[in-house]
Image (cartoon, rainbow, N blue to C red):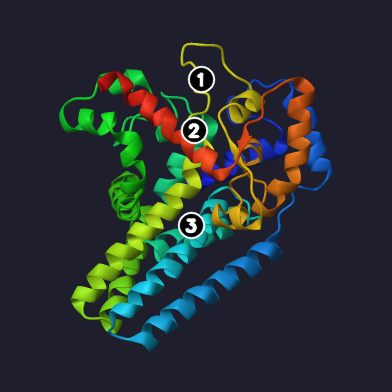
Amino acid sequence: MPQAVAATVAEHIRDGSEGPGSTQAPGSDFAPLLKAVRGQGLLERRTGWYAAGIAVNLVALGAVVTGMFLLGDTWWNLLLALPLALLWTRTAFYGHDAGHAQITVGRKAGRVVGLVHANLLLGMNEAWWNDKHVRHHANPNHVDKDPDVGVGALVWTQKQAAQREGFARWLTRNQARLFFPMLLLEGIALKIYGFQFLLRQPVRERALSGLLLTGHLALYAALLLTVMSPGKALVFALVHHALFGLHLGMAFAPNHKGMEMPDPDGDRWGHLQRQVLTSRNVRGAFLTDWLLGGLNYQIEHHLFPSMPRPHLRLAQPLVKAHCAAIGMPYAETGIVESYRQALRHMHEVGEPLR
């Protein structure tokens, strides 16, 4: 099961190894950092923090829904699509953390949290997300192993670009300027991917996931059609999903695009090298941390995927100091620059086709 795999990988990192099949030696560059982080209690779960955050998020979602009913059948309801999209992204962050076994001690409890937040509240199959995300964490930016840099609507290497034909070739030529507009479709795409993944799930899991995904669609449609006329409901749904996809995509886009991509035929990188060199941190104050869900500390998150999100910023000084001590580059930039670097990489990938 993807949830079990996610929890297993998280526990391997918690114990100081790289995961199944790891050959990391006890004296590796990662071992002293792991010892320092564990010594400060940064791998301990923050159940109370998560419980409070989830409760606040649910209350806020309820407040937006209440506001929709109070406004009624009016175009002014479109204004509430923005806060609802922001809160859906918070919901996605909690689902993400549940998949990394950050929230609960038991795997079953963690899966319940993931199912409620992803499948029921967002209509996004948590099994699909965990399957893809675990493979990404195991080999970030590896063109043969990381699904996030595989060939899709976008491509990430000039070798991938050279194989594009027809409309896909035009898309690759212009992918840098089309990136943000394409994110407007991501909210709907996530639902489609989730339903497609049902066919790959065992029968019992498929039934539960399918029931929750269908329940989400029914509840969402019932809410909109109860409050608004069909025309307004359709426009609201499109605007809401566009904003959700844009915000979620902008939260994840700065993390790896334009960073090192391991040579599939080259030497095998150790855990520290594999996670640090392929990841980028985004500097910022409270607002940046909130908008990006704390995942702007992406290097720390990749080194310690089971570390609770509020501890990532606390681990950063330890990680930066350790990287400096061993001479390993540590990428950190502002939020605007992070997008610029990612877009520049996409532009360079499509350059031979122009």
Q: Residue at left 32%, top 22%?
A: 351
Q: Residue at left 43%, top 28%?
A: 345
Say whether marks 3 and 1 touch (CB < 8 Å). Answer: no
What whole-number distance in Å separates the C-alpha atoms at marks 1 and 2?
18 Å
Mark 2 is surrounded, within 10 Å at the Cα level, by few (under 14), some (14 to 19) or many (20 or more) other residues, namely: some
Q: What residue type is labelled 3?
A: Ala
Which of marks 2 and 3 precedes in the sequence? 3
Left or right: residue 256 compared with residue 13: left
The x, y position of residue 10, in whole percent, is 62, 41
**Which residue is outermost to the right?**
39
The x, y position of residue 297, in whole percent, is 63, 43
The x, y position of residue 95, in whole percent, is 51, 56
Q: Nearer the viewer, residue 123 or 183?
A: 183
Q: Name the residue under label 1.
A: 262
Which image quarter: residue 161?
top left
Q: Which of 24 and 203 is in front in this view?
A: 24
Mark 1 is surrounded, within 10 Å at the Cα level, by few (under 14), some (14 to 19) or many (20 or more) other residues, namely: some
Which of marks 2 and 1 precedes in the sequence? 1
**Which residue is outermost to the top?**
266
Left or right: residue 254 compared with residue 242: right
What whole-number distance in Å separates the C-alpha atoms at marks 3 and 1?
29 Å
Q: Which amino acid does label 2 sit on?
A: Gln
* Mark number, residue 341: 2
The x, y position of residue 239, in whole percent, is 31, 64
Q: How many marks?
A: 3
- For the C terminus, which image quadrant? top left
Q: Mark 3 points at which residue?
A: 92
Q: Nearer the viewer, residue 104 or 293?
A: 293
Q: What residue type is labelled 1?
A: Pro
What whole-number distance in Å separates the C-alpha atoms at marks 3 and 2?
25 Å
Label 3: state its secondary structure: helix
Label 2: state its secondary structure: helix
